[in-house]
Image (cartoon, rainbow, N blue to C red):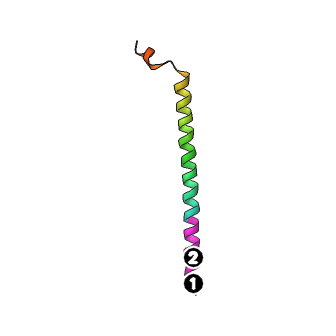
Amino acid sequence: MVDWPKILGGVLLFAAITWVIVEIREDGARSERTAIERQNNDSGEPRSFKAH
């Protein structure tokens, strides 16, 4: 006979681990994007000078 509680528990555990990995990768990508934007902003001229 199929042990449904174990199968369901395994599927839920796999889904939870997958969700955590996706969230960590998303946060890492977001922080990397922010760092690049900050680096670009710091390297350029102030915006008030670009308009003239």
Q: What span is in magenta?
A: 1-14
* Label 1 SS: loop
Give how far across and how far down residue 43 sits, in percent.
56, 22
* Magenta stretch: includes residue 11: yes
Mark 1 and mark 2 in contact? Answer it, CB < 8 Å: yes
Circle 2 sits on which residue? 7
Q: Determine the main secondary structure of the stretch shown in magenta.
A: helix
Circle 1 sits on which residue? 2
Distance from the alpha carbon under mark 1 to that under mark 2: 8 Å
Q: Amino acid at mark 1?
A: Val
* Magenta stretch: includes residue 43: no
Give how far across and how far down residue 45 sits, in percent.
50, 18
The residue furthest bottom is: 1
Residue shown at 59% from the left, 78% from the top: 6
Residue shown at 53% from the left, 27% from the top: 40
Q: Earlier in the sequence, mark 1 or mark 2?
A: 1
Residue 52, compared with residue 26, is above or below; it is above
Residue shown at 59% from the left, 72% from the top: 10
* Label 2 SS: helix
Q: Amino acid at mark 2?
A: Ile
Residue 33, compared with residue 12, is above or below; it is above
Total residue callouts: 2
Give how far across and how far down residue 8 sits, in percent.
54, 75
